[in-house]
Image: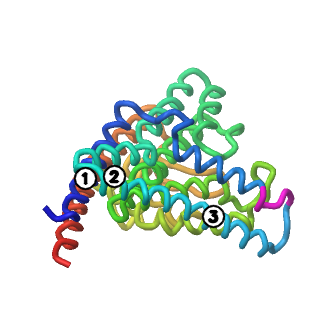
Amino acid sequence: MPFLILDAAAAAVALLLALAIDRWWGEPPAALHPVVWMGRALGACGARVAPAQATGRDLWSFWLASLAWCALAAIVLVVSGVLQWAALAHLPVWGAALALGLLLKPLLAWRMLRREVLAVEAALGESLEAGRARLAWLVSRDVRQLDAAAVRESAIESLAENLSDSVVAPLFWFVLLGLPGAALYRFANTADAMWGYPGMRGGRYWQWAGKWAARADDALSWLPARLTALLLWLAARGVRWSALRALARATPSPNGGWPMGAMALALGVRLSKPGVYVLNAAGRTARAEDTRRAVDLASRSIAALIPLLLAALLLIAIVCRHV
């Protein structure tokens, strides 16, 4: 059997295995988690490339941070590429699939996302303060002034956006570029979360130092965000695509509005970030049961994604075989 077909077979089994590991066991310990390692490296570099106070136009910080991002990304690509090559070149197909599945799993996180969103709803059932405190684990925005409806909206928005960032996008890039693709995406997304802020954060000024990280994440998330919206649109049924396209343009992010807008329309609720955007303004206020409905929609979207990705792997294998 040609080597490329074996690659596709191993990748398909690895994809299913990674999702199964995520469902049954969740995240590996922090000491063994590659995304945690990425975060530590970004934190160490960020303390050196971003100024400690606000500046004007700062091209020095921009280029210094850009070079640091590229250097770290190169390390991620080389390490993940070597690991993939070693698995495919030196192990039988079943061994390569097992190794790739174990390596891919930390780059996606559905079980943890689902758990944290439902935990916000459970905490809201106790008190508003408990709901705010639990939401602070999930989002970076200031939660102190949010009422119960806004806390619930924020949790649902985070579910929709992270469905793309933490599940769809890593698997999308794994299918296209293998383990290095998934690893590079998770690095870019982590870098955006830590560096991609237009102002002060964590005692550092990111207006210029974080621009490269933010734009890189925008570029790598462009297709997965729209694929996520399509999956939610298909899972919900009855949502007008034209309405979704209009909502997607309402957010500052070129990507976040797609899955969040799709979720708002699918649930028939209003989602907003105070002072920034309102999605589906005509929708009703989100209720407790809408959180569970949102999780169910996301689960159905992932279920619909799996056969699409497997079909894509098969198509790629067939095309490569005849090239």
Q: CA distance from mark 3 to mark 1?
A: 31 Å
Residue at the outermost left position: 1
Mark 1 element type: helix
Quarter holding the N terminus is bottom left
Residue in the picture at 30% in, 43% down: 98
Write the start and end of the magenta stretch as one range.
Answer: 48-53
Circles 1, 2 touching at the beta carbon (< 8 Å): yes
Q: Is residue 14 magenta?
A: no
The label number, if any, that marks residue 87 in the structure image: 2
The label number, if any, that marks residue 69 in the structure image: 3
- Residue 298, located in which quarter of the rendered image? top left
Q: Earlier in the sequence, mark 1 or mark 2?
A: 1
Residue at the outermost top position: 126
Residue in the picture at 53% in, 23% down: 125
Q: Position of residue 223 (x, y in %)?
A: 41, 66
The residue identified by callout 1 is 10
Q: Position of residue 157 (x, y in %)?
A: 51, 47
Q: Earlier in the sequence, mark 3 or mark 2?
A: 3
Q: Earlier in the sequence, mark 3 or mark 1?
A: 1
Residue in the picture at 16% in, 65% down: 2
The dominant secondary structure in magenta is: loop
Residue in the picture at 60% in, 44% down: 139
